[in-house]
Image (cartoon, rainbow, N blue to C red):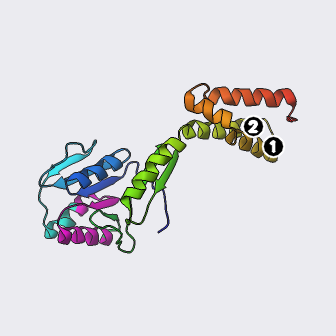
């Protein structure tokens, strides 16, 4: 499978299933999409900002639900394998993405996997093991949370610094060298992680030094 990042802003995600797995999927997508959860019961308390609809759809009802809500992604997360299969087939027929939450390590062609994710906005890192080792995904996610501390601030430094340098007509090779030096600076990483410095201050310091030296830093 090829990892992709998908923007669900303004899109709808339809989740069939109100158990623990359905709730986790709802919380995940509700950060960005409009989420609708359909289930006869909701055994988890936290579905994020999702809209909960108490209903017990049968296989013959599924197509009507998908047509009515017109989702970009459909999640099959019930405890009924036959119903999940119907959900997946109906979603594909209507051109929606499909995530089967009841299968581990076994994926239909064209299916979507929701990986373990570490966010240090705007930096996003995802881990997937093909459904074979969820415990490993969790372990790696926890390990990466520490590694990525400060990465969001660093990304903002790089983005704004590149823009500022370009506006000052600094040659491309010089811009790349400066940004590379910034990213490879252990002291700067420490400062950003501890709050001893912020990205605006770093940019001002770099630009000031560049102006002072005329780009001839040792």
Is 148 one of the magenta-colored residues?
no
Query: Which residue is located at x 84 percent, y 26 percent?
Result: 212
Quadrant of the snapshot with the C terminus: top right
- The secondary structure that most of the magenta stretch takes on is helix
In which quarter of the view is residue 216 placed?
Answer: top right
Q: Is residue 93 above or below residue 202?
A: below
Which is more N-terminal, label 2 or label 1?
A: 2
Q: Residues within 10 Å of mark 2 (few under 14, many from 20)?
A: many
Residue picked out by circle 1: 174
x, y percent for residue 172: 79, 46
Q: Which residues are magenta?
A: 66-93
Q: Nearer the viewer, mark 1 or mark 2?
A: 1
In which quarter of the view is residue 79 placed?
Answer: bottom left
Q: Is residue 159 above or below residue 38?
A: above
Q: Secondary structure at mark 1?
A: helix
- Left or right of residue 138, residue 212 in this image: right
Q: Is residue 48 above or below residue 41?
A: above
- Left or right of residue 203, residue 7 in this image: left
Tell me whether circle 1 and circle 2 mark residues in contact (CB < 8 Å).
yes
């Amino acid at each position: 499978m090829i990892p992709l990042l998908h923007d669900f802003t303004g899109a709808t995600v339809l989740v069939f299933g109100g158990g623990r797995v359905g709730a986790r999927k709802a919380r995940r997508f509700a950060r960005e999409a409009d989420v609708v959860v359909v289930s006869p019961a909701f055994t988890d308390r936290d579905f994020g900002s999702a809209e909960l609809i108490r209903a017990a759809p049968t296989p013959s009802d599924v197509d009507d639900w998908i047509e009515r809500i017109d989702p970009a992604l459909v999640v099959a997360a019930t405890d009924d394998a036959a119903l999940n299969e119907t959900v997946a087939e109906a979603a594909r027929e209507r051109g929606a993405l499909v995530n089967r939450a009841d299968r581990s390590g076994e994926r239909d062609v064209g299916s979507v996997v929701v990986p373990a994710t570490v966010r240090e906005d705007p930096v996003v890192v995802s881990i997937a093991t093909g459904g074979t080792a969820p415990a490993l995904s969790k372990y790696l996610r926890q390990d990466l949370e520490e590694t990525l501390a400060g990465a969001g601030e660093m990304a903002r430094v790089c983005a704004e610094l590149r823009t500022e340098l370009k506006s000052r007509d600094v040659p491309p090779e010089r811009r790349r060298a400066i940004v590379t030096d910034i990213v490879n600076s252990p002291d700067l990483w420490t400062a950003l992680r501890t709050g001893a410095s912020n990205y605006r201050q770093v940019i001002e310091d770099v630009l000031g030094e560049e102006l002072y030296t005329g780009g001839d830093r040792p």
